[in-house]
């Protein structure tokens, strides 16, 4: 192998390794945005001004409703929440989906418990047969991000106040 071919091979290999590292080093917002099934959640996080927070150091555990979960809300609910005058309510709902720290499914397996959310109240967790977060079912668990973990849920959960 010539020096030129060796240099190109090494450069290509290093580039591929950097690309793989960059793909693994995505924060919660970028991981959700890249998944393709959280467009509504990402739009809501932007409207609520929470992007910088969820791109922060964390760690965070996010119970992420899919686009289909948002579609289950009563007609007009999401549109109303996205209005600037309803930003405080949107922030309250979104931060109810976030728990400080990194909670993996193995940490709660077989347990019934509760966790304090960033919003301030507690979310009920039932991991005795599958995993339920309040009335939402976890459909996919343990999606790693560099600043926490995402658990996909099939419904939007709402604080009880």
Image (tube, rainbow, N blue to C red):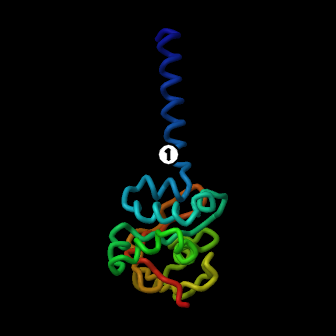
In x, y percent, where is residue 21?
54, 42
Front-most of residues 94 and 87: 87
Side of 140 where 4 appears, left or right: right
Q: Residue at x 36, y 73 (%)?
A: 69
Answer few, some or many: residues within 10 Å of disc 1's Cα (few below 14, many 20 plus, some between 14 and 19): few
What residue is shown at x 41% (from left), y 73% (from top)?
A: 78
Residue 91: image quadrant is: bottom right
Q: Give the mark count.
A: 1
Residue nearest the observer in this picture, 68 or 137: 68
Give residue 11's position: percent from left, percent from top: 52, 23
Q: Is residue 49 above or below residue 99?
A: above
Q: Which secondary structure lies at badge 1?
A: helix
Query: Residue lying farthest bottom?
Result: 161
Name the residue rendered at 61%, 85% in the picture.
Answer: 121
Left or right placement of residue 34 versus residue 72 in this view: right
Instruction: Residue 47 in the image: state x and y as whole percent.
Output: 51, 63
In this view, the residue in front, 125 or 48, is 48
Residue 149 rendering spot, x and y as whole percentages? 54, 64
Image position of 113 with respect to 67: above or below? below
Q: Given the current orientation, which residue lies at the most extreme right position?
A: 57
- The residue to which callout 1 is attached is 23
Residue 55 or residue 111, whichever sits in front: 55
Quadrant assignment for the C terminus: bottom right
Q: Residue at image x 58%, y 63%? A: 49
């Amino acid at each position: 192998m010539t020096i030129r071919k060796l240099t190109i091979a090494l450069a290509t290999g290093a580039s591929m390794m950097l690309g793989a590292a960059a793909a693994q080093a995505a924060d919660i917002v970028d991981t959700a945005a890249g998944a393709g099934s959280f467009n509504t959640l990402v739009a809501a996080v932007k409207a609520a001004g929470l992007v910088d927070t969820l791109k922060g150091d964390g760690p965070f555990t996010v119970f992420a409703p899919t686009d289909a979960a948002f579609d289950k809300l009563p007609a007009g609910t999401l549109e109303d929440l996205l209005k600037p005058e309803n930003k405080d309510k949107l922030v309250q709902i979104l931060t109810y989906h976030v728990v400080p720290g990194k909670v993996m499914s193995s940490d709660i397996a077989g347990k019934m418990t509760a966790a304090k959310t960033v919003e301030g109240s507690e979310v009920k967790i039932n991991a005795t047969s599958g995993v339920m977060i309040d009335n939402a079912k976890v459909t996919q668990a343990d999606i790693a991000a560099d600043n926490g973990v995402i658990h996909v849920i099939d419904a939007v959960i709402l604080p009880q106040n």
